[in-house]
Amino acid sequence: MVKVALLVLLGCAPGDPGGSPPVAAIPNPLDEGWEVVGRRDGVVVYQRPHAGSPHPEVLAVGILDVPPWVAKNAVDDVVADDGMPYLAEARILKRDERGLVIYNRVSPPLVADRDYAIRFFDQSYTIGGVTIWIARWRTANDEGPPKRSGVVRVPINEGYWRFEPVDGGKRTRASYWVFTDPGGAVPAPLAAVGSTTLLPDVVNGLAARARRPKYRAKMPPVPTRPLPGP
């Protein structure tokens, strides 16, 4: 039952929707308030309170044995379902200048199905000749389909993947941050345990996906925008 909490599809799309947080606002372990709550399979999991919510933010950090742009290609494959626990349905609803809108339905054990729509967009930037690849998403239920009988609509689902070069760009420091309210009657402490339990599997699932040769076929365009100010 603790596995219900992670309701996030791995992926992103090009574009930058109006009103999205600046890159400088993206959380990382150096920010205040993070507490290490788990270590498994090379992944460190952090947690901290989220203002105004009983549900915490969670962050997982691990090393991938591929260059950052390869990891970004793997995340951009939004129709791939490996690494997404209990994914029952995934559809691209819209493509526009602001990115993608994607609908997901997950079917975890012991509790009702959950669904949500998310807008995916890119916030990658280059600073000092180094590119930081970032895939970000935010809740977009207003752009999704109507609620379905017997399926709980997830009210909040936002997060990001951040890929930074290590070892001269041969490997990647991957950071995966998520803040979600699973909806329904799932207690906040149980949801938090579920998220921290699953995060290492998600990071290592992406690591396995990124090793596929197709993700090395073509490097994405290098972003030219600099790091925005705070």
Image (cartoon, rainbow, N blue to C red):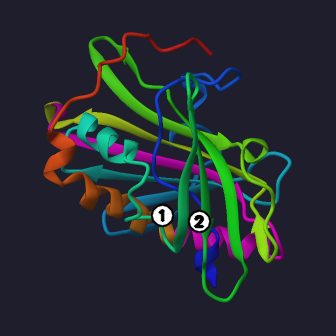
Amino acid residing under circle 1: Leu
- The nearer-to-camera label among 1 and 2 is 2
- In this picture, residue 69 sits left or right of residue 199: left
Residue at mark 1 to residue at mark 2: CA–CA distance: 8 Å
Label 1 with label 2: CB-CB less than 8 Å:
yes
Residue 162, image x, y percentages = 42, 38
State yes or no: residue 177 in magenta. Answer: yes
Question: Picture quarter containing residue 27?
Answer: top right
Residue 6 bears which disc, if any?
2
Q: Which residue is mark 1?
A: 199
Residue 219, image x, y percentages = 21, 29
Q: Secondary structure at mark 2?
A: loop
Residue 129, image x, y percentages = 26, 12
Residue drawn at the location 79% of the way across and 77% of the way down: 150
Residue drawn at the location 40% of the way across and 68% of the way down: 201
The magenta region covers: 169-197
Residue 192, image x, y percentages = 66, 68
- In this picture, residue 189 sits left or right of residue 222: right
Residue 122 bears which disc, if any?
none
Residue drawn at the location 59% of the way across and 65% of the way down: 6
Question: Picture quarter containing residue 79?
Answer: bottom left
Along the line of sight, which residue is nearer the eye, 139 or 167?
Answer: 139
Picture quarter with the C terminus: top right
Residue 27 visible here: no
Picture quarter with the N terminus: bottom right
Q: Residues within 10 Å of mark 1 (few under 14, many from 20)?
A: many
